[in-house]
Amino acid sequence: MTRTQTAYCSACDRDVQILVTDDADHDAHANIPDAEVVCLEIGDRCTGSLCPVGAVSHTAMLARRVKIGVRTVLQPLIKVECQVCARVTDYFIIDRDYATCGECGNTVEVKQIDPAMGSDN
């Protein structure tokens, strides 16, 4: 479950829309993931390499967006077998060097999944 809210972004110097994932219900012995902040406007007017709202790199924030299903039409796709899902899925190119599986959120270097894209030709 996620909720949308606004937060001040010091890189953009304005309020931006973010998603906050909810903490999972759990018993005292279970490992629980922390809630994650996902900026919905990263790259739109972003000026920094570190997202101050989520305290992660631009690449990590884009990977978070793909993982929760918030994708842009501008992200190119590669259809390839995911080593984590063990099935052919869409990998979203999130920057020059990294791609993220649209099914499980696994992020890998592009040259690991498409050697032609890793060359400096």
Image (cartoon, helix red, strand yellow):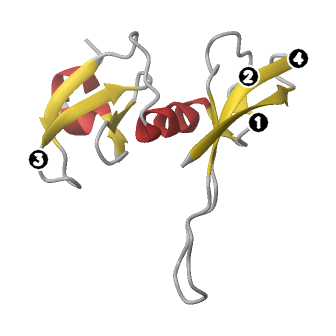
Checking the image for residue 13, the label placed there is 4
User: How far across and how far down the image is residue 93, in percent?
Assistant: 35, 24
Q: Which residue is mark 2?
A: 48
Q: Earlier in the sequence, mark 4 or mark 2?
A: 4
Type of the residue with mark 4: Asp
Query: What x and y, as percent, mark residue 115?
Result: 18, 29
Which residue is identified by label 3? 87
Amino acid type assigned to the residue bearing label 1 in the image? Val
Identify the residue shown where x is 61% and y is 88%: 28
Q: CA distance from mark 1 to mark 3?
A: 34 Å
Above or below — where is 82 with respect to 13? below
Q: Nearer the viewer, mark 4 or mark 2?
A: 4
Task: Compare marks 1 and 3 and give the one earlier in the sequence.
Answer: 1
Distance between the alpha carbons at the discs numbered 3 and 4:
42 Å
> Measuring 47% from the left and 36% from the top, which residue is drawn there?
63
Callout 4: 10 Å neighbours few (<14), some, many (20+)?
few
- Mark 3 neighbour density, 10 Å: few (under 14) some (14–19) many (20 or more): few
Amino acid type, residue under disc 2 in the picture: Gly
What is the secondary structure assignment of the residue under circle 3? loop
Mark 2 vs mark 3: which is more N-terminal?
A: 2
Residue located at (87% from left, 25% from top): 10
- Residue 45 in percent (x, y) is at 70, 10
Label 1 with label 2: CB-CB less than 8 Å:
no
How far is mark 4 from mark 2, CA to CA?
Answer: 11 Å
* 81 shown above or below 71: below
The answer to whether the residue labelled 1 contacts the one labelled 3, judged by CB atoms less than 8 Å apart, is no
Q: Which residue is mark 1?
A: 53
- Which amino acid lies under the numbered mark 3 shown in the image of this protein? Arg
Circles 3 and 4 in contact, beta carbons < 8 Å: no
Label 2: element kind: loop
| Residue at position x 13%, y 53% in the image | 86
